[in-house]
């Protein structure tokens, strides 16, 4: 059994294992959690009430999560004298799945972002963000219910790799000199320089994960989003390698948009029409060229994708994209369904998954029992779906939606509506639980 310096394992429960590439979950899995800083305690307390009650009701008390507290951020500094102790990394690696509250990044003091460190040290290369509308939530869109998308953002490379040199430094000059002399470019000497690496292997593992997700969750399409018309060997290559992994590894399960187009055209003898992102035969019914309802692999240029997310979001189900555009698109999409306060997230690697709300630690609201715990609650819903406890996950989603419809909402959503009195974080959790029965 795994040994920790300062952590006491729960008396009951078993660790999650991976057997033949599949998660092996008992009725009492041990799942580590990190409370987080700032509002972390407010939202995790509320979420635990909701998660535990849903599991109990969905499985007639036959299943129960054995929560195991591990530490990062301020609580870790108190206990270990450092913000990200080895115990914590070891526990997440060993138990495969964990959930965390937001962590404050101390300004100064030489600490890097704990969130970034966790992702890098645990090799959590896919940032997964489901974007789904729940009735009753104020949205800037006319038809927000058309959105039900899962975004897979590459988490480790692109311009986020941190390779850059400040304008005027020796390093920047040396790099510019080298490129100008050896590569024939004409870069200005007063430029700052950043490097944008996008690799074949890291692109493929991300797109592979997105396609596997689409298969496991019976989604109809995966869209590779890129800016390859301008950045051919990075963004363009992302698209090329994305299609490559689809065709090489999932040939029997996928059809590319071009193939579908050609097949439908051949069957009808006329140009097919594009409906809901799929080429429909003019004879109607199911797309003629898509036998067995294969997953359609398509690609869109990033600027187009931003527009279509607003105008035709129901044509997209799973989206895979590089780091920078993924960062922009996930927040833009979250804004369409009510903001970061209700958008959940996860960072997932080959064997480990860490679920977390998308917002930060909002320190000014700490302990006020005021903020919206939905992002945290829904990150738990993602986790329940990930371990296959679908009934509990769906029970939470339905009850949460009922609470929104009944205008049982926290201040952040109430201020966007007229004449609605906000309720507290803990009251919101109780409102959800009351609607489970
Ligand atoms: P933030 O904590 O997300 O808060 C910004 C604003 O968003 C809050 O002032 C509040 O808006 C609103 N908000 C956030 N969470 C909310 C919730 N649950 N319910 C209702 N409203 C919510 O962003 P920040 O102030 O930029 O960052 C604070 C700290 O968190 C920083 O140290 C940052 O590094 C860290 N951070 C951590 C993570 C993470 O752990 N994954 C992510 C992002 C940031 P109003 O003031 O308008 O009410």
Image (cartoon, helix red, strand yellow):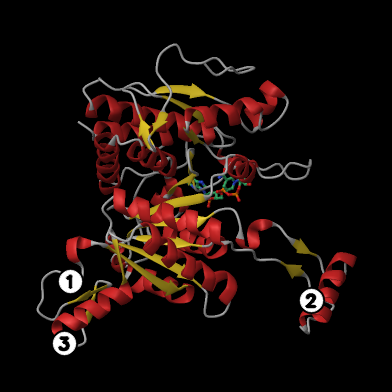
Determine the residue positioned at 48% across, 43% down. 350
Residue at the spot of label 3: 269
Q: Looking at the picture, does residue 202 appear above or below residue 66?
A: below
Give coordinates of residue 316: x percent, y percent.
33, 65
* Residue 415 visible here: no
Q: Which mark is residue 404?
A: none
* Residue 245 visible here: yes
Q: Secondary structure at mark 3?
A: loop
Q: Would the CB of label 2 be found within 8 Å of ligand 1? A: no
Give coordinates of residue 428: x percent, y percent.
36, 37
Determine the residue positioned at 57% across, 63% down. 324
Determine the residue positioned at 75% across, 63% down. 164
Residue at the spot of label 1: 287
Q: Could you tell me if the residues under marks 1 and 3 are in contact, i.e. CB atoms within 8 Å?
A: no
Instruction: Mark 1 or mark 2: name the one nearer the start of the chain.
Output: 2
Q: Distance from label 1 to label 3 (Cα)?
A: 14 Å
Give coordinates of residue 437: x percent, y percent.
19, 31
> Could you tell me how many numbered marks the image carries?
3
Q: Distance from label 3 to label 2 (Cα)?
A: 52 Å
Would residue 327 be found to the left or right of residue 296 on screen?
right
Q: Residues within 10 Å of mark 3 (few under 14, many from 20)?
A: few
Determine the residue positioned at 38% across, 57% down. 249
Instruction: Mark 3 or mark 2: name the one nearer the start of the chain.
Output: 2
Pick whichever, 17 or 337, lies toward us: 17
Q: Residues within 10 Å of mark 1 (few under 14, many from 20)?
A: many
Q: Looking at the picture, does residue 46 appear above or below residue 239?
A: above
Q: Which mark is residue 179?
A: 2
Viewer-side label of 1, 3 = 3
Q: Secondary structure at mark 1?
A: loop
Pick whichever, 269 or 27, lies toward us: 269
Instruction: Mark 1 or mark 3: name the one nearer the start of the chain.
Output: 3
Q: Secondary structure at mark 2?
A: helix
């Amino acid at each position: 059994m795994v040994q920790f310096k300062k952590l006491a394992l729960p008396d009951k429960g078993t660790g999650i294992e991976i057997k033949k590439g599949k998660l092996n979950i008992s009725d009492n899995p041990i799942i580590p959690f990190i409370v987080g800083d700032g509002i972390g305690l407010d939202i995790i307390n509320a979420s635990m009430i909701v998660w535990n009650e849903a599991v109990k009701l969905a499985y007639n008390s036959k299943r129960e999560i054995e929560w195991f507290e591990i530490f990062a951020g301020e609580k870790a500094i108190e206990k270990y004298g450092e913000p990200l102790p080895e115990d914590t990394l070891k526990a997440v690696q060993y138990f495969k799945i964990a959930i965390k509250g937001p962590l404050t990044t101390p300004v100064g003091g030489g600490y890097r972002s704990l969130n970034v460190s966790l992702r890098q040290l645990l090799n959590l290369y896919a940032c997964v963000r489901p974007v789904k509308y729940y009735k009753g939530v104020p949205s800037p869109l006319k038809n927000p219910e058309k959105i039900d998308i899962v975004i897979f953002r590459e988490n480790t490379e692109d311009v986020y790799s941190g390779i850059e040199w400040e304008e005027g430094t020796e390093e920047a000059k040396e790099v510019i000199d080298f490129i100008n002399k050896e590569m024939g470019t004409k870069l200005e000497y007063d430029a700052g320089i950043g490097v944008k690496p996008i690799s074949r292997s890291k692109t493929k593992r991300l797109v592979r994960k997105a396609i596997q997700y689409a298969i496991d969750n019976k989604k109809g399409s995966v869209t590779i989003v890129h800016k390859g018309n301008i950045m051919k060997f990075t963004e363009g290559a992302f698209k090329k390698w994305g299609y490559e992994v689809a065709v090489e590894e999932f040939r029997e399960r996928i059809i590319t948009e071009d193939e579908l187009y050609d097949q439908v055209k051949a069957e009808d003898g006329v140009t097919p029409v594009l409906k809901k992102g799929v080429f429909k035969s003019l004879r109607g019914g199911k797309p003629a060229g898509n036998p067995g309802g294969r997953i359609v692999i398509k690609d869109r240029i990033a600027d187009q994708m931003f527009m279509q997310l607003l105008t035709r979001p129901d044509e997209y189900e799973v989206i895979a994209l590089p780091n920078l555009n993924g960062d922009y698109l996930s927040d833009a999409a979250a804004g369409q369904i009510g903001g970061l306060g209700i958008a959940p997230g996860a960072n997932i690697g080959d064997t480990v998954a860490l679920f977390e709300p998308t917002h930060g630690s909002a320190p000014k609201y700490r302990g006020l029992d005021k903020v919206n715990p939905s992002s945290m609650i829904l990150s738990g819903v993602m986790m329940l779906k990930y371990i296959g406890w679908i009934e509990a996950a769906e029970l939470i989603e339905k009850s949460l939606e009922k609470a929104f419809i009944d205008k049982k909402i926290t201040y952040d959503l109430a201020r966007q509506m007229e004449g609605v009195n906000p309720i507290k974080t803990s009251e919101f959790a109780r409102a959800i639980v009351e609607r489970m029965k």
